[in-house]
Amino acid sequence: MARQTTQTDPATEAWTLLSRLMMSRKGHMLETAAAFELSPPQMWALRHLEPGVPLPMSALAGLLHCDNSNVTGIVDRLESRGLVERRPADHDRRVKHLVVTEAGAEVRALVDERMNQPPPGFERLTAQEQRHLAALLRKLIE
Amino acid sequence: MARQTTQTDPATEAWTLLSRLMMSRKGHMLETAAAFELSPPQMWALRHLEPGVPLPMSALAGLLHCDNSNVTGIVDRLESRGLVERRPADHDRRVKHLVVTEAGAEVRALVDERMNQPPPGFERLTAQEQRHLAALLRKLIE
DNA sequence: TATTGTTATACTCTATAACTATA
DNA sequence: TATAGTTATAGAGTATAACAATA
């Protein structure tokens, strides 16, 4: 008779708890996007674009895990609101670089501020526990 | 002159690391859904439906953070594949209960197995660190 | 009157395939 | 030939508003 070896290993348990925590934040994500009249993909695109760092369309497609053809539409809508701009790359004129405008950087900062806000629950951990958690996650991510 | 008090508090740092970790799993989520020919919302719906536990459509809408009218279409497609069934509730015939079929339960189990797999990185933590991480997350979630 | 789920509508996201302009 | 981005197309997700059935 097999022993009960699948008692749920600690890595799987930690990962499952972690997934549950993130799932519980989906509402907050949608509210944040709606607060700035952004669709979720538009918000992620804006968050991936660092002000002052031009990014090729195809690189954004990779970050968003979608096809290049989708990025065209997502960027169209961000550009029509003046949040990002397209600029042909110097080294290869097929490539278009995306750059965040000043207005885009402002919205992006507000979005980031809101999304980086730790969810309820963290205040139940002591400062030392919070630091320990951060240390474990750093080691996990490398 | 103000002191540098915003050194990034540990809760925000932990939360930011945590968000980064989950974002890095988006590709895995999309691949899992695609492997079972499910759209992301269809996969989430199936994961929210516990076999043997009937759930009203409106409750699922709440869990998915979307409007009731969306659930109609999402469930239509799951039902046409024989993964879930609609059943009028006894106590209130306006309500329709969703129940996972046997075929649905099988797909759901495979999806769960794949999604619960801890991502790369966990093997860099010792078993004790993994247990500690799980304990901190349990306290965080309550 | 209020609520559950559906339908109608319009917009966005999504992948695929075909196209363009560069390389 | 190959690649970056666009366009065309079809299907799915999304919210809003109007509706039917039920409470």
Image (spheres, coloured by chain):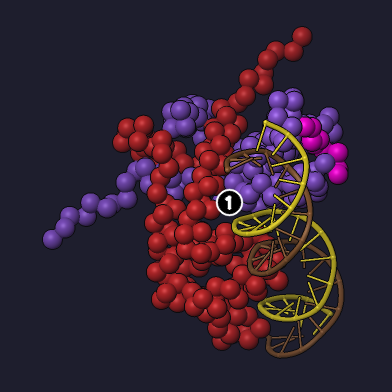
Chain colours: A purple, B red, C yellow, D brown
Seen at 53% across and 47% down, the residue is B27
Does residue A63 appear to the left or right of A14 in the view shown? Answer: right
Residue B24, x across and y down, in percent: 53, 40
- Which structural element holds mark 1? loop
Check disc 1 and give the amino acid type.
Answer: Ser
Residue B9, x across and y down, in percent: 60, 26
Observer-nearest residue: A9 or B36?
A: B36
Q: Furthest residue to the top?
A: B1
Q: Is residue B44 above or below residue A27?
A: below
Q: Which residues are magenta?
A: A80-88
The residue where tag 1 is placed is A24
Seen at 49% across and 78% down, the residue is B82
Residue A85, x across and y down, in percent: 81, 35
Does residue B28 appear to the left or right of A35 in the view shown? Answer: left
Q: Is residue B88 above or below residue B73?
A: below
Residue A122, x across and y down, in percent: 56, 38
Dot 1 alpha-carbon crowd within 10 angstroms: few under 14, some 14 to 19, many 20 or more: few
* Residue B8 location, quadrant: top right
Does residue D21 appear to the left or right of B80 in the view shown? Answer: right
Seen at 48% across and 56% down, the residue is B32
Query: Is residue B52 visible in this depiction of the protein?
Result: no
